Image: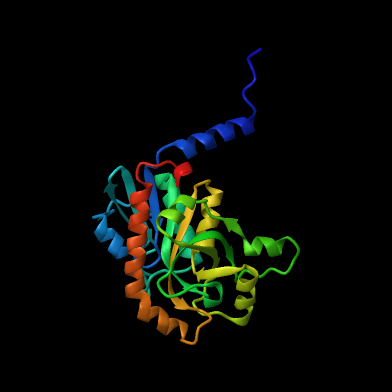
Amino acid sequence: MAPHDDQPEVKVEAMASEALNKPISTIVIFIAMHTEALPLVNRFQLQEDHDSVFPKGVPWVRYHGMYKDLHLNIVQPGKDPVLGVDSVGTVSASLVIYATIQALKPDLVINAGTAGGFKAKGAAIGDVFLASEVAFHDRRIPIPVFDLYGVGLRQAFSASNILKELNLKIGRLSTGDSLDMSAQDEASITANDATVKDMEGAAIAYVAELLKVPIIFLKAVTDIVDGDKPTAEEFLNNLTAVTATLDETVAKAIDFLNGKCLLEI
């Protein structure tokens, strides 16, 4: 009789250990808006992929290239084909990151972008947060267990050394498909104990967990949600300056990641 294979859970643990100790090679950076992505594309001299790994006809965009020992990929949902605006929100984000992970098999996903922050939780314009956990605030399903599914609380990959090296702030991220905040959203965000809010993070976290890829979140604050200025106005006024801060932070993170394995970040 042939010898039995190792127990399945032993194999899984061995594979997980190998992945954690392997030098990071391929990184995918998901950024929702072109304005946020362009400084990084230019900084790392990435080229647009014209022989796309994505399905024919979709507006999704990929820039790629080598930086030191890293294969860098920046992916975006691109412009809405009808309205010509950035395809922000959870639907586009989840589709793009699913297709990207399937095609490129990255060692690490980084979701970088701008976000609203709460001054009551210590956020200020220009702060960059590393998200500890992510959740939804607009998927309200008041049925036992379905309510937890709706919130979809997930932990980000622990990146304590990046946190220290870049002197970042840390806090929970809450995701919804609206830029503004209704009273119901506010109650859910408070329940999520969130410091920052965005329109993509929790959806990307769902896909990354599904496909077993580690993910970290770098979110730069453009507007104070619980402040006295209109959110849209404050966001647009601060977008350029805060995007520059985000660019610097992501660049430092990439430099830090070069030559390291997941256990070292």
- Quarter assignment of residue 176: bottom right
Q: Residue at x 34, y 67 (%)?
A: 245
Q: Position of residue 257 (x, y in %)?
A: 38, 47
Q: Establish if 195 lies above or below 67.
A: below
- Quarter assignment of residue 40: bottom left
- In this rendering, would 46 be left or right of 148? left
Q: Establish if 227 lies above or below 219.
A: below
Q: Residue at x 43, y 44 (%)?
A: 107
Q: Position of residue 169 (x, y in %)?
A: 48, 63
Q: Quadrant of the N terminus?
A: top right
Q: Nearer the viewer, residue 164 or 106?
A: 164
* Number of marks present in the image shown: 0
- In this rendering, would 105 be left or right of 62? right
The residue lying furthest to the right in this view is 144
Q: Nearer the viewer, residue 148 or 243?
A: 243
Q: Position of residue 51 (x, y in %)?
A: 29, 51
Q: Position of residue 103 (x, y in %)?
A: 41, 46
- In this rendering, would 212 be left or right of 63? right
Q: Residue at x 41, y 61 (%)?
A: 112
Q: Establish if 248 lies above or below 102.
A: below
Q: Residue at x 43, y 82 (%)?
A: 232
Q: Nearer the viewer, residue 26 or 120?
A: 120
Q: Nearer the viewer, residue 87 or 166?
A: 166
- In this rendering, would 52 be left or right of 146? left
Q: Establish if 213 lies above or below 126.
A: above
